[in-house]
Amino acid sequence: MVDVTRVGTGDPLEFDVTIDGGEGKTQHRVTMSRETYSRVSEGEQTPEKCIEAAFLFLLDREPKEAILAHFDITVISRYFPEFEEKLPVYMRRAKNSDSV
């Protein structure tokens, strides 16, 4: 399960993310600029759902323990160049579920 809580309303937006599954939990602090949010969401998702979708993308590629503890969402593209191209699929998944 991916739990996303917005903790900042400035720019960049800040989120606490908890991943609970398997053995134990991991905690992450993620930032996302309003410009990045506008670009990746196209106004169709909340910022929280965008972050959830980003974590669903990451969890399909690596264990929760391998995800950085603190990062900006744009860093994902450095490790996975296909991130922004694939994100709409994950946003649909996030939109269609209350919890993962």
Image: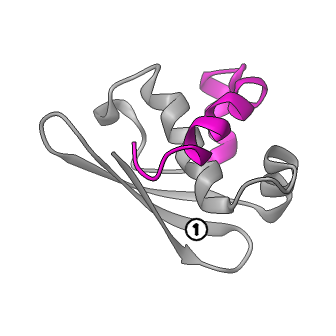
Residue drawn at x 22%, y 39% is: 21
Which residue is denoted by mark 1 in the rendering?
14
Considering the image in quadrants, where does the N terminus appear?
top left
Residue drawn at x 58%, y 68% is: 14
Residue sitting at the far bottom: 9
Residue sitting at the far left: 23
Q: Is residue 56 left or right of residue 75?
A: left
Q: Quadrant of residue 24?
A: top left
Residue 56 versus residue 70: which sits nearer the camera? 56
Main secondary structure type of the part rendered in magenta = helix
Q: Is residue 77 left or right of residue 29?
A: right
| Residue 18 is a magenta residue | no
Residue 49 versus residue 34: which sits nearer the camera? 49
Q: Is residue 41 left or right of residue 80?
A: right
Q: Position of residue 26 (x, y in %)?
A: 27, 48
**3 w.r.t. 23: above or below:** below
Question: Badge 1 local density, few (<14 within 10 Å), some, or many (20+)?
Answer: many
Residue sitting at the far front: 96
Q: Position of residue 29 (x, y in %)?
A: 46, 59
**28 w.r.t. 6: above or below:** above
**Stretch in magenta:** 73-100
Per the image, label 1 sits on a secondary structure element best described as strand
Coloration of the structure image? one colour
| Residue 79 is a magenta residue | yes
How many labels were placed on the picture? Answer: 1
Q: Is residue 52 left or right of residue 65?
A: right
Residue drawn at x 69%, y 61% is: 46
**7 w.r.t. 41: above or below:** below
Q: Position of residue 74 (x, y in %)?
A: 70, 42
